[in-house]
Amino acid sequence: MLASGSPARLRLLRAAGIEPEVVVSHVDEAAVSASDAATLCATLAEAKAVAVAANIDTGAGAALVLGCDSALAFDGQVLGKPADAYEAERQWQRMAGRTGVLHTGHCLISTVTAKRFGEVSSTRVRFGQPTATELAAYISSGEPLRVAGAFTIDGLGGPFVDGIDGDPGTVIGLSLPALRRLLARHDVSITALWNSP
Amino acid sequence: MLASGSPARLRLLRAAGIEPEVVVSHVDEAAVSASDAATLCATLAEAKAVAVAANIDTGAGAALVLGCDSALAFDGQVLGKPADAYEAERQWQRMAGRTGVLHTGHCLISTVTAKRFGEVSSTRVRFGQPTATELAAYISSGEPLRVAGAFTIDGLGGPFVDGIDGDPGTVIGLSLPALRRLLARHDVSITALWNSP
């Protein structure tokens, strides 16, 4: 079960052969603060998973609930989704040609054992240098307003990210190697979750 | 126009807002040999683009033809698609826990100006260590038999790749930053190719 409304996370899981039930947690993200991006992501991922796990009808059988949260650490700041087009543009003007670190927190709860395990995955991102025309077109598309750090690597933003150092799923919002490790701690192999062909 | 039958390349372009016409080139890849993976990819990408560009009805108007080819350089060898399940498994047993470099060659031809520009993009890949059970399930899925290097980061293989250093599109088979640069050399902005919303 995926405790996230992010279409990018759902696409990523589906591409990896996993079809989760999606339940959005309605955790008030603005109410949570933390000194650094990694701690913030870990806290919010856990809050989302806990909120959804608490509301599951236990008569429904075994479930694993995954909460995820992402934020960009850049220049000593924690950047979530930009508030508006102006903020997205200003952010890109600072980021262009430089690097940041995208952190994604994961928390996986079993409703059967009530055990919960967490992992934060971090990937360095090297931003490219879109021209003024490209940046204007990108902001107009609306995409940067919907994502942490105002960029994607799996959407319209892809051509404007020169490279990453780490796991690409982390940048999209869900690390598959981290999920594999968290599942193993619950004694589940990720291949057991693959849809039958 | 995409001179490639790869579903992963088409998915990647579509996710980036570009809907190409797909024309498969039928270049005999086995007939081409090269001393290193980067040269091989550049040669095959150009051969594919040239073959498709030559067959375009010039009455059909302006077209940009993109050819791509990928190969994994590992342990001094050039690895394309594995011949069978046995080879895929043997390859993974060698790759597990180690690193290789995925090279993708790109060639972009304009049928109007007849200019052609090429770029090879290279990304380091750090392979994880699937358990024997996971590896058997992965080989059985058939996915590794269809791709260069016997792995993906955008499919079932994602959990078994710990990280990359470079552009993720390169590993999937088409680098969006490289495409952006090649388009710019043809005086086309990549944002001009985005589907209208």
Image: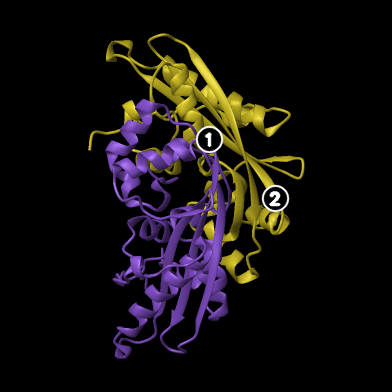
Chain colours: A purple, B yellow
Check whether the beta carbons of the residues at disc 1 and disc 2 lie within 8 A of each other: no
The residue most toward the left is B197
Eye-nearest disc, 1 or 2: 1
Residue B147, image x, y percentages: 54, 46
Residue at mark 1: chain: A
Crowd band around label 2 with a 10 angstrom C-alpha radius: few (<14), some (14–19), many (20+): some
Residue B86, image x, y percentages: 65, 56
Q: In percent of the image, x 77 and y 40: which residue is there?
A: B76
Q: Label 2: state its secondary structure.
A: strand
Residue marked by disc 2: B99
Which of these two is toward me, A60 or B50? A60
Residue marked by disc 1: A97
Residue at mark 2: chain: B
Q: Is residue A175 visible?
A: no
Q: Is residue B94 visible?
A: yes
- Answer with the quarter of the image where residue B60 lies: top left
| Rendered-image quadrant of the N terminus of chain B | top left
Q: Which mark is residue B5?
A: none
The residue most toward the top is B113
Q: Label 1: state its secondary structure.
A: loop
Residue A74, image x, y percentages: 51, 49
- The amino acid sitting under disc 2 is Thr
- Answer with the quarter of the image where residue B96 lies: bottom right
